[in-house]
Amino acid sequence: MKKSVVLSTNLFIVAMAAWIFLACYLGKPPAGSAKWGFIDTTGQEIIKPQFTRVEKYSEGLAAVDRDGSLGFIDKQGDMVIKPQYQEAGPFSAGLAAVKWNDRYGYINTAGTMVVAAKYDWAGDFSGDAAAVGVDDKFGYIDRQGKWIYEPAFEFAGDFNDGMAVIRANNQYGFLHKDGQLVMTPQFEFIRDFHEELAAVKVGSKWGYCNKQGNLMIPPHFDWAWNFKEGAGLVKLGNKYGYINKKGDFVISPKFDWAWEFSEGLAKVMIKGKAGFIDHTGKLVIPLNWNWAGSFYNGCAKVFHNGKYALINRQGQVALPAGYEKTTDFSDGFAAVQEIQTVNPVKKKFWKAITITRQCLRWAKELIF
């Protein structure tokens, strides 16, 4: 009975978070919302805040929204692909997915539509393949828009390590980049391949399989994430730790929350405070932060004195918390939002959305 009550409570929290998300987050931002710009890794403001929406830089270009449509700017801030899209993803292998006239296609870095906008959904290219959706089914195309695997799946993920996660009949399997179905759907859930292994869910437990679908690390963890820099993030009981590719713990499960390694460091949390450990498990940046992101281009995003800031690998604040929000670095740039100049009611509105996003992250863990 107690377990049923807990489950019902969790579902109620998820439902409430989803309701707030749909009612608030998907609505238009309040009039006068602060604008976005970009900084480099030294913290210098390269492109002053002027856009209502921005996407990360990739291959030297970033999608931005100034007047309701998305275009692309270069690293000098010049608009090199005129605003005309409803949605725009990052460039990958020279192509970016864009939504134009309610359909998705792909443009090159010159802004030429090289794959016609005819899909219901489009993912990023990884090498020569990208997932696309048509009539609630998903398949894969090549860079000319030809089918590698025609729409047949309930879900189709991006390629990682030459493999993509697919779902059919509510079971997950793998597709090779050449279109060969390497492993027919058979697992309850699968994550992407990283460093030749993928986390898989078997029953209520997690383990890791290789590209032939063989279980290399038996499923006895309560949760598992990707291998990064030779370490796999797992949860045992209510604590997080890291294993090697033999399945042995190299950092014992002792953290209340943790994340994958990036640039030699991994963020961890104990008693509501975040810091960073190295590959030996040593805490090299103290638990000083209420929240922290991963390291990219030598910096990590933290929540500092009520605002977002960036720290360097020594844990020093590299960029003072002078912006309302900041993204992670990508391609040497991070997006920053100027401090909001809205009334207290609107401030509470946006704070509620931030909380909702966190609730949804917790919800994902509850479900999986």
Image (tube, rainbow, N blue to C red):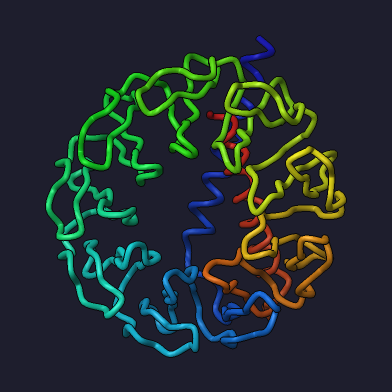
Total marks placed: 0
Tell me which corner region of the image, top left, top right, bottom left or bottom right, holds residue 123.
Answer: bottom left
Q: Relative to 364, say whether 243 is above or below.
A: above
Question: Of 280 and 260, which appears nearest the observer?
Answer: 280
Q: Position of residue 253 (x, y in %)?
A: 75, 27
Pick the quarter of the image with the N terminus: top right
Residue at the spot 59% in from the left edge and 67% down from the top edge: 329
Q: Position of residue 252 (x, y in %)?
A: 77, 27
Residue at the spot 37% in from the left edge and 76% down from the top edge: 70
Q: Relative to 300, say whether 342 is above or below.
A: below
Residue farthest toward the top in the current orientation of the protein: 1
Residue farthest toward the left in the current orientation of the protein: 146
Residue at the spot 35% in from the left edge and 86% down from the top edge: 80
In the image, 367: left or right of 83? right
Q: Position of residue 37 (x, y in %)?
A: 57, 81
Question: Of 18 and 206, which appears nearest the observer?
Answer: 206
Tell me which corner region of the image, top left, top right, bottom left or bottom right, holds residue 180.
Answer: top left
Residue at the spot 21% in from the left edge and 41% down from the top edge: 178
In the image, 74: left or right of 150? right
Question: Of 341 and 303, which appears nearest the observer?
Answer: 303
Q: Position of residue 4 (x, y in %)?
A: 61, 15
